[in-house]
């Protein structure tokens, strides 16, 4: 039999436009780096995880839940939505859950944008935003950060067109840690039309200490505002991937309609319920992170004077073209950070000992 296709080029089976799309870059494995360098262990300060382990009761709740893993989880996530509603004073019908807040951002774009519609956001901001836009068929509109490495909300308002369907406001901003204040956010929301969905991404809300940074939940009287939150960061559930949003009942229902069925899995629901019972411990851990954040910031400003103040659990070093070189210098000494080529380096706040190790590397590389 003749193989007529042997010398034919393979057919293209995937979208050509995805070739230009960057991959999401996770933090490097510390075990791999430790083996590479011959170290007992490496320090990972690249993924904005909280370093203090699972909250009390979470492991036990997840272990018990696994016994029922042959059954599908509650697709309505009724118990968890009720617990979130009680804690934050909102109606359960206004809540939707998903596989992290990033997945919910993707579902919101799917629920609002058709091909050619515009998704607007500040840049640099969360690196998943352009990926979400492209895979949903929406057009990205990136508005450059201001001189202080934060959102330029006036420029963002001016960039809204009749094709803009959704705007993402990352507050505090990932990866720069900067945060917008209430007066500027008020002016922005007043300027944006009611037909544009404004999504306030508050993945790091629990680390905010600046009283001028508003709680997004206070804007829920505006029907075009949605607030994203996650249990991956302050609540210590990064490995279980669970996030939630609050919007109007109509928006929340639309998201629940397009979300992947059963994506809030059994273990995640159980772990989240156990975590929510530990609010006091979360507050204590966040205070530890904030204290270290201020110490690390003060130390770094000796070498990087324009390092911005952070309201998250990380700091931003605006090193420009030196970002990748600095990242390599850190890895060479067993500390994993997150460089963004041409822009800067994001460094997660770890334990005091981990932060001391990073500061020693930073002093050697920057002084």
Image (tube, helix red, strand yellow):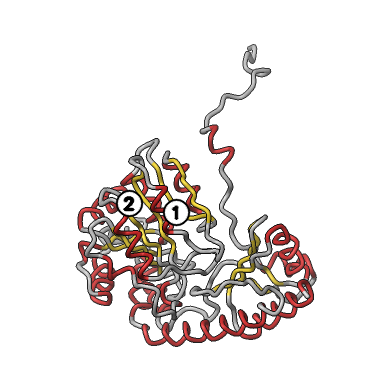
Left/right of residue 227 with respect to residue 341 in the rendered view: left
Quarter of the picture holding the N terminus: top right
- Residue contact at pointers 1 and 2, CB within 8 angstroms: no
Where residue 109 sits: x, y (%)? 37, 48
The residue shown at (42%, 38%) is 137
The residue shown at (65%, 61%) is 339
The image shows residue 349, relative to residue 220, as above or below, that is below
1 or 2: tag closer to the N-terminus: 1
Which of the two marks, 1 or 2, is nearer to us in this view? 1
In terms of image quadrants, where is residue 275?
Answer: bottom left
The image shows residue 279, relative to residue 155, as above or below, that is below
Q: Which mark is residue 121?
A: none
Where residue 150 sits: x, y (%)? 51, 64
Residue on which the image places disc 2: 261
Label 1 environment density (alpha carbons within 10 Å; few <14, some 14–19, many ≥20): some
Q: Nearer the viewer, residue 342 or 238?
A: 342
Q: Which mark is residue 155?
A: 1
The residue shown at (45%, 87%) is 284
Q: Secondary structure at mark 1?
A: helix
């Amino acid at each position: 039999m003749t193989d007529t296709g042997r010398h034919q080029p393979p057919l293209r089976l995937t979208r050509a436009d995805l070739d230009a799309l960057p991959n999401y870059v996770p933090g490097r494995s510390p075990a791999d780096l430790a083996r590479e360098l011959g170290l007992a262990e490496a320090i990972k300060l690249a993924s904005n995880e909280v370093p203090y382990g699972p909250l009390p009761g979470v492991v036990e709740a997840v272990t018990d839940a696994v016994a029922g893993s042959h059954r599908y989880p509650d697709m309505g996530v009724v118990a968890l939505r009720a617990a979130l509603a009680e804690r934050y004073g909102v109606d359960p019908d206004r809540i939707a859950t998903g596989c992290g807040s990033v997945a919910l951002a993707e579902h919101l774009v799917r629920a609002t944008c058709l091909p050619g519609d515009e998704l607007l956001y500040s840049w640099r901001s969360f690196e998943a935003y352009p990926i979400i836009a492209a895979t949903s068929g929406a057009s990205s509109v990136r508005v450059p950060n201001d001189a202080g490495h934060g959102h330029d909300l006036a420029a963002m308002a001016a960039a809204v067109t009749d094709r803009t369907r959704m705007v993402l406001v990352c507050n505090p901003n990932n990866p720069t840690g900067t945060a917008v204040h209430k007066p500027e956010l008020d002016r922005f929301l007043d300027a944006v039309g009611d037909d544009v969905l404004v999504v306030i991404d508050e993945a790091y809300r629990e680390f905010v200490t600046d009283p001028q940074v508003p709680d997004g939940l206070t804007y829920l009287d505006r029907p075009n505002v949605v607030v994203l939150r996650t249990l991956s960061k302050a609540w210590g559930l990064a490995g279980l991937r669970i996030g939630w949003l609050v919007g109007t009942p109509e928006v929340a229902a639309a998201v629940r309609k397009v979300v992947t069925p059963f994506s809030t899995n059994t273990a995640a629901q159980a772990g989240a319920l156990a975590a929510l019972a530990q609010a006091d411990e979360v507050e204590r851990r966040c205070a530890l992170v904030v204290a270290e954040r201020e110490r690390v910031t003060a130390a770094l400003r000796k070498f990087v004077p324009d390092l911005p103040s952070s309201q998250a659990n990380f700091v931003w070093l605006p090193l420009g073209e030196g970002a990748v070189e600095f990242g390599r210098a850190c890895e060479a000494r067993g500390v994993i950070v997150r460089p963004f080529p041409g822009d800067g380096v994001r460094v997660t706040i770890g334990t005091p000992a981990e932060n001391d190790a990073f500061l020693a590397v930073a002093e050697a590389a920057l002084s």
